[in-house]
């Protein structure tokens, strides 16, 4: 009897507090996960939420034709971690639509009819790590739209009608690693709009009508820097000018922008960007300077190496010139000696002397004796008496 009284008291208390321990009949509940998607009957969001278990952490309300989210709708679901409101017809959201959801980690608002978002819509979602706004009708975003989302890692803004990205939109999102801007109407994008997201490794920019003019050179350098750090950037195909139509900005050589150098240098030295004046020493200027990555071409190590190489080359040039001068002097000296020697008469190494008169007589006598001896030899060989 006492047990029944206690149970009845608890149920009465839960009902007074607006908390239910039962799963709505139109939903599917498994543990702390509740799926109320694709309902075949007309049911209001409030009627479903009033029946949800108080400890629900995963809630899916997709494909239900909900037109709006009223203020404080989810205030009784403070334990909610995952909220899916995709594939509805949401066109109106209030600044406090997601109040009290301090633990929310994932929010999906994709495939709705959102044209604009309240400035402080996400201000209380301190734990949010992934936000999906894909396939809406967003035309512009407020610079402080994502202020306070310090834990945000993935942001999907693809398939909207964004024609520009505010300069300070990503300020404070140092943990953002993935960003999609695919399928918007972006023609240009300031490098300073992306630099605050220092951990950004994946950026998707395909499907925009990029105008690859001189104003896009800073973005090209930033994309090259991201790729150098090991990041991922998809194709950035140019729609204009005509000579660059269909070409990927990442692969266009800088020689194609040679005519832009004077304008580019003037733009870099100017303190104005996107029509927003930035005075020296202003917070915005400090933020941009803080997050601007150092160019590899200006790195201190590169300068030192270049200086050493230039020094070695200069030393080799000096040594080569000195050697050439010495060699030329020696060759000239040797040539001079050769010319001086040819001008003097050289004495013959062997002098043939004519024989004197006595030597001539002795030579004649010797020859005569040799002839007599030869005749005697012949007579002895053939004596007269033997001769016929």
Image: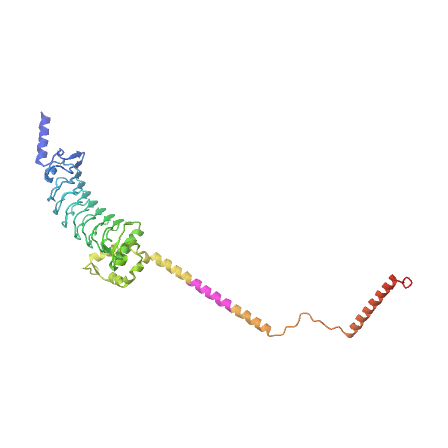
Kindly give the residue lying farthest to the top in the view shown. Answer: 1
Residue at (84, 65) in percent of width and height: 374
User: Can you say which quadrant of the picture contains the C terminus?
Assistant: bottom right
Image x and y of residue 37, in percent: 16, 38
Image x and y of residue 157, in percent: 20, 48
Q: What colour scheme has been applied to the protein in the rendered image?
A: rainbow
35, above or below 126, in the image:
above
Displayed quadrant of residue 291: bottom left
Image x and y of residue 201, in percent: 27, 49
Q: Is residue 176 visible?
A: no
Q: Is residue 253 left or right of residue 46?
A: right
Image x and y of residue 219, in percent: 26, 55
Q: Is residue 311 visible?
A: yes
Magenta segment, prevailing SS (helix, strand or loop): helix
Residue at (36, 58) in percent of width and height: 304
**Magenta span of residues:** 314-328
User: Can you say which quadrant of the picture contains the N terminus?
Assistant: top left
How many numbered circles does the render carry? 0
Residue at (9, 34) in percent of width and height: 15
42, above or below 357, in the image:
above
Kindly give the residue lying farthest to the right in the view shown. Answer: 385
Q: Is residue 125 left or right of residue 336?
A: left
């Amino acid at each position: 009897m006492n047990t029944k009284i206690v149970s009845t008291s608890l149920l009465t208390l839960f009902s007074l507090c607006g908390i239910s321990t039962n799963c709505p009949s139109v939903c599917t509940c498994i543990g702390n996960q509740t799926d109320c998607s694709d309902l075949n009957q007309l049911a209001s969001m409030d009627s479903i939420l009033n029946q949800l278990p108080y400890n629900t952490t995963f809630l899916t309300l997709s494909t239900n034709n909900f037109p709006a989210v009223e203020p404080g709708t989810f205030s009784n679901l403070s334990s909610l971690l995952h909220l899916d409101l995709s594939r509805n017809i949401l066109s109106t959201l209030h600044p406090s639509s997601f109040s009290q959801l301090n633990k929310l980690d994932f929010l999906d608002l994709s495939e709705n009819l959102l044209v604009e978002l309240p400035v402080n819509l996400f201000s209380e979602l301190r734990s949010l790590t992934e936000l999906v706004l894909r396939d809406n009708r967003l035309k512009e975003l407020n610079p402080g739209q994502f202020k306070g989302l310090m834990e945000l890692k993935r942001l999907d803004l693809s398939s909207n009608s964004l024609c520009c990205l505010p300069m300070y939109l990503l300020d404070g999102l140092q943990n953002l690693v993935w960003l999609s801007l695919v399928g918007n109407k972006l023609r240009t994008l300031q490098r300073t709009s992306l630099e605050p997201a220092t951990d950004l490794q994946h950026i998707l920019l395909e499907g925009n009508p990029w105008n690859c003019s001189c104003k896009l050179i800073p973005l090209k350098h930033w994309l090259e820097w991201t790729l150098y750090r090991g990041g991922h950037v998809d194709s950035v195909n140019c729609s204009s000018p005509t000579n660059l139509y269909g070409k990927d900005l990442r692969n266009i050589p800088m020689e194609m922008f040679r005519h832009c150098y004077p304008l580019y240098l003037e733009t870099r030295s100017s303190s104005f960007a996107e029509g927003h004046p930035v005075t020296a020493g202003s917070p915005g200027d400090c933020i941009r300077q803080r997050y601007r990555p150092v160019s590899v071409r200006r790195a201190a190590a590169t300068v030192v190496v270049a200086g050493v190489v230039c020094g070695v080359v200069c030393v080799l040039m000096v040594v080569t010139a000195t050697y050439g001068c010495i060699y030329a002097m020696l060759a000239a000296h040797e040539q001079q000696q050769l010319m001086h020697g040819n001008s003097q008469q050289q004495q013959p190494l062997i002098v043939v002397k004519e024989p004197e008169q006595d030597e001539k007589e002795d030579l004649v006598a010797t020859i005569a004796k040799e002839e007599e001896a030869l005749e005697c030899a012949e007579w002895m060989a053939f004596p007269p008496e033997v001769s016929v």
